[in-house]
Image (cartoon, rainbow, N blue to C red):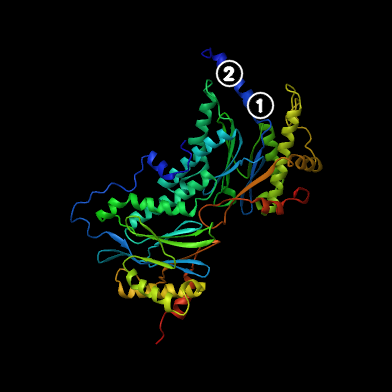
Amino acid sequence: MGMQGDFFQLLKEQGYQFPAPSHVPEGSRADITRGTTILAMRYRDGVLVAGDRRATAGNMVMYDRTDKVLEIDRHSVMAIAGVPATAYEMVRILEHSFKYYRRTQLQELSFEGKLRAVSKLLKDNVAAALAGTGAVAPIFAGYDHDQATAKIYFYDILGAEFEGVEYAVSGSGSPTIRGILHYVNTWGGQPLNRLSEEEATVQALRLLTSAAEFDSATGGVNRETGLYPIMKLIKASGVQVLAEAQLRSLFDSQVTRHV
Amino acid sequence: MYEEPYRWVEAIGNRRRYLDEQFRQGSPVIALSYADGLLLLTAGRGTPKLYEIYDRIGLGGMGHPADLEKLRFGLLEMAHMEGFNRSPSDVTGARLVKYGLAPLIKQAFEEIFKAPHIVKMLLAELGPKAERDTFLTVNYDGTFEEWSGCAAVAATLDVQKAMVDVVTRSVSHMTAPFQEALRIALHAWSLGSFLQQKDHETPEGTPTGAAQADGHAPPLPDDLALTAHLREVLTGKTIECAVLERQAPGSSKYRTIKPDELRDLLPDGLKG
């Protein structure tokens, strides 16, 4: 019938191809731009998703104001690690396909449906991921209205989907903070999911600062130029972006060491 | 037999009469700008007639539900492909109507061996400022008109005009808060519905409704008569209302007003 609200199908019918067919000659794929550290963690009111701002190509800093935490609709975000060119295109497709579904079918796409769409894009992208030109390992977080809770999922570059019950990390700086998250969540006094919004924000700022300490591809905070990580909260009411002023005040009071 | 020009003109005339007849009992749609955005309103028996087309575009329609669905899907496809391939700001109501919807409807109308689309449609597009809100109406033969401030679709062009006039006369709708705008829209809708009903009751062949033989419009019903009419009509129908809000968070500005919310805002006599 062609009235199923499938945006992927519509793209195909209109001759759009994702991903672009990739054949990369050996030795020509050295310095592809990549994005780095992202994290998502549950806190008392929902999920906090954060990402540093750096994009690198080999040893070069390509850009220091990248937004890696992208809103797909009012209740879901995708944080991206890997090749931004592919990741941004995925986000564009997802954004339009969720909207298209809602508007044609007159109902919101289910949370499972949204997860499925992310997996599908990653699976379609396997060839480019293995060729080294389009590997993306995202974190998808959103509010599941059926279960009245915010959830975190993370993916490998082949599209396998894993639920991050308490937290998820991805990108080159992630090994550093994964250990810290495990430690804090287990022995940190209170588990992450009991933290208030402010406590969770401070944790995320400290975690990304630690990642930047040990990973050259992760950008840190630069107070002089007003450069702070992107942080977004997912709650029942929708996605909320944390303002730079708020991050600055928390960073100054609780992250910087005044020796 | 249609190869003679006269036959063709006659066939088109028949088709117009047939289509006019189809809309006589339809529910009009009214759309207007207010302080915080745009409002669309109609009343129906269950099947929704107001829809979200794109980030800043809403649709109201009357006619056959299957035709409406088919054309709505066409609009959605065109809008989303354009928004994806270019940019959301390149998706405009005017382009959707002029290069998509209107030619399709006109073609179906003139292919006299095939069924025409039984639809009248209204596209409302939220501009960056109230003065730049635009409305487009498309008739069953593909003719379209662009409006600002407010627009309506109804069984006849006379009724449409009466609805638009009553909104325009209310002066302040552009700066009115939502509840006041809702009252104005409801007033215009009841007027449209009232005039259509009168047209319907008058025997065919006599000049009716808003357009009398002497060219003078008949006196409009007073508020009391309209409220009584509205109360009567709403026993079998429910009010449907949607808004496009300029300050809504995120890119999608369209929101359906839920029945509970609507009930609280309706004038006292209509809360049901």
Q: Is residue A95 above or below residue A165?
A: above
Residue B115, position in %: x, y? 55, 25
Residue position marked by numbered label 1 in the rendering: B21
Q: On residue A46, which mark appears?
A: none
Picture quadrant where residue B224 is located:
top right
Residue at point 62%, 54% (across, down): B36
Residue A225, position in %: x, y? 39, 72
Label 2 residue SS = helix
Q: CA distance from mark 1 to mark 2?
A: 15 Å
Residue at point 66%, 32% (across, down): B157
State the residue in front, B245 or A212. A212
The amino acid sitting under disc 2 is Ala
Residue A224 seen in this snapshot: no
Residue at point 49%, 68% (across, down): A242
State the residue in front, B39 or B211. B39
Residue position marked by numbered label 2 in the rendering: B11
The residue positioned farthest toward the left in the image shown = A27
- Label 2: few (<14), some (14–19) or many (≥20) C-alpha neighbours in 10 Å: some
Which chain hosts label 2?
B
In the rendered structure, the answer to whether residue A81 lies left or right of residue B182 reads: left
In the rendered structure, the answer to whether residue B246 lies left or right of residue B41 reads: left
In the rendered structure, the answer to whether residue B237 lies left or right of residue A136 reads: right
Q: Are marks 1 and 2 on the same chain?
A: yes
Residue B190, position in %: x, y? 73, 40
State the residue in front, A183 or B253. A183
Picture quadrant where residue A140 is located:
bottom left
The amino acid sitting under disc 1 is Glu
- Label 1: few (<14), some (14–19) or many (≥20) C-alpha neighbours in 10 Å: few
Total marks in image: 2
Discs 1/2, front: 1
State the residue in front, B208 or B50. B50
Residue A109, position in %: x, y? 50, 50
